Image (spheres, rainbow, N blue to C red):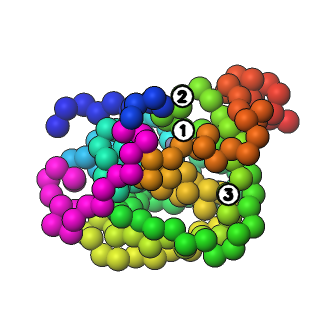
Amino acid sequence: MAVLEIVRMGHPILREVARPLADEEIQSPDILQLIQAMTDILHAAGGIGLAAPQVNRSIQLAIVEVAEIPGRYGDLPPSPLTVYINPSITVLSPEEEGFWEGCLSIPGLRGYVERPQHIQVDYLDLPGEPNRMVLEGFLATVFQHEFDHLQGKLYIDRMKDTRLLSFEEEFAQFQLD
Ligand code: ZN
């Protein structure tokens, strides 16, 4: 497989609704190689989530990994690398909370986005088995951000106040206190 590159905002694939993976595709060499390559990119970039459209593949696949980096993401418990295929989200409680989000496809920027903080995620795991998990707080935000990528949405679409969009340097200077 060719070396993958992260596609950035403005590339039309980020605005497509990705297609679901068929059962027989899930453990194919193509998909397993893609997951490995996405994992390498995520680690190199120091991110916590990556969706297939961000590496120019319009399929319903995302990975999330919360590494144990003290202070990096507040009190977030570490979460091992997990593959999410054909995910769907059910909002369990509509109450929203805001976080400053970043995106590997929108480098250098942060934006304040409010999202529901109690969700259920139904998905297929890497062997292809159905799974369900309930997520709260910042992790709920992380998953909604990644799964938005599979629907052709970016976090800036979710912003209610575009004045809360900032370059990372200015974010560090004026917002982090
Ligand atoms: Zn993103």
Dot 3: what SS? Answer: strand
Q: Is residue 22 magenta?
A: yes
Q: Residue at x 48, y 56 (%)?
A: 147
User: Going by the image, does 75 lie left or right of 11?
Assistant: right
CB of residue at label 1: within 8 Å of ligand 1? yes
**Alpha-carbon neighbours of circle 1 within 10 Å: few (<14), some, or many (≥20)?**
many
> Do tag 1 and tag 3 residues touch (Cβ < 8 Å)?
no
Frontmost of labels 2 and 3 is: 3
Q: Residue at x 44, y 53 (%)?
A: 151
> Do tag 1 and tag 2 residues touch (Cβ < 8 Å)?
yes
Give how far apart the Cα atoms at labels 2 and 3 are.
Answer: 21 Å
74 w.r.t. 44: above or below? below
Q: Mark 2 = which residue?
A: 107
Q: Mark 3 = which residue?
A: 115
Q: Mark 1 = which residue?
A: 103
Residue 70 visible, this angle: no
Give how far apart the Cα atoms at labels 1 and 3 are.
Answer: 16 Å
CB of residue at label 2: within 8 Å of ligand 1? no
Observer-nearest of 3 and 25:
25
- Which residue type carries mark 3? Arg
